[in-house]
Amino acid sequence: MLRESLIYLSESDTARTVVTRTPLRAMARRFVAGETVDDLVRAIRESNARGLSATGNFLGESVHDEANARLAADVYLEVLDRIRSDGLDANISVKFTQLGQDISDAFLAENLGRVLARAAEADVFIRFDMESSAYTVRTLDAFEKLWAEGHRNIGVVLQAYLRRTAGDVARMNELGARVRLCKGAYVEPPEVAFQKKEEVDRNFVELMKMLLDDGHYPAIATHDERMLDATIEHHTRRGLGKDAFEFQMLYGVRRDLQEALLRDGYNVRVYIPFGTHWYPYLMRRLAERPANALFLAGSVVRESPLGFLLPKRRDGAR
């Protein structure tokens, strides 16, 4: 119920107007690097200094006018230039709809083409994010078209809560494409997606095994310790090297797990979003993990005039 409510709020213009005027705007910086490319670069540098690779994502989706779609592409061109000039260990993640998929196929090809060309020059990998199930087929078809055109520095995201994903994993494995596996963050009907957490978890583990067994440097994106343990157990049992895949986590989420995995010798990448469209992203992160909502709720109280009533931690903070 909480998850559905938060996702509903992520799509509400009224809620967006109210929430963006509250302390949540400042607190979103735990999960969002900031609003500018400089903010993103700062966060990437800090992550690299900790031993983490990074993925930069300019927030936004479902763009229906050419001007904003071109603006998004321009921002990614700047990010790619900075990755190359600053020697950052980073790649980028984009959405087809942000670059004009809903405008026309011709416009998307032209606008995205600019980003693909610059990424090739900079030798930077591009991941295409997956959106709601309404876009799954269109995203994979667009991805395969780019692959057929010879692009090899590209990968895609697949979602474990969709019933169809086992077939899509097999399809991408056969293609030779790199896949990021995540659980999924949209509300979908029962005929499309598993509704129970245990069903999603079970499918995640099966898909993870398919990717580790037959995939091409897959990214296992989760903060769920049971999913992490299952991945480690499977790769150990199969005798796979720790460099055969990478774990991916969200910026600002479970930093303790990030550090633990690094200490154990695994490759870990953080997904770092930035931009002014932080509100729907934040709401979906809260929907994915109730502990995130509790963290932010506690932060709101600490920032309020009654914050002094909270008990102090051992380090002296409240």
Image (spheres, helix red, strand yellow):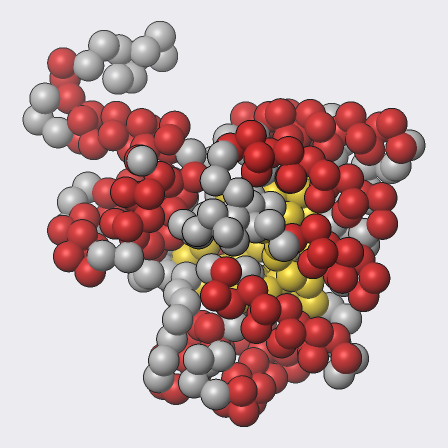
- Residue in the foreground of this view, choosing between 170 and 227: 170
Where, quadrant-wise, is the C terminus in this rendering?
Answer: top left
Depicted 70 relative to depicted 316: above or below: below
Residue 31 position in % (x across, y down): 40, 44
**Location of residue 223 in the rendering, given as x and y in whole percent from the top left corner:** 55, 33
Residue at 41% across / 61% down in the picture? 59
Q: Residue furthest left?
A: 305
**In the image, what residue occupies the spot 58% across and 86% down?**
109
Question: In the picture provided, is 141 more to the left or to the right than 307?
Answer: right
User: Which quarter of the figure is the N terminus placed in?
Assistant: top left
Please tell me in which quadrant of the rendered image residue 170 appears. Answer: bottom right
Nearest the viewer among 275 and 7 is 7
For residue 139, what is the image quadrant? bottom right
The percent position of residue 103, horizontal first and vertical second, equals 43, 85
User: Is residue 200 or residue 121 the one in the foreground?
Assistant: 200
Residue 258 visible in image: no
- Residue at the outermost front position: 191
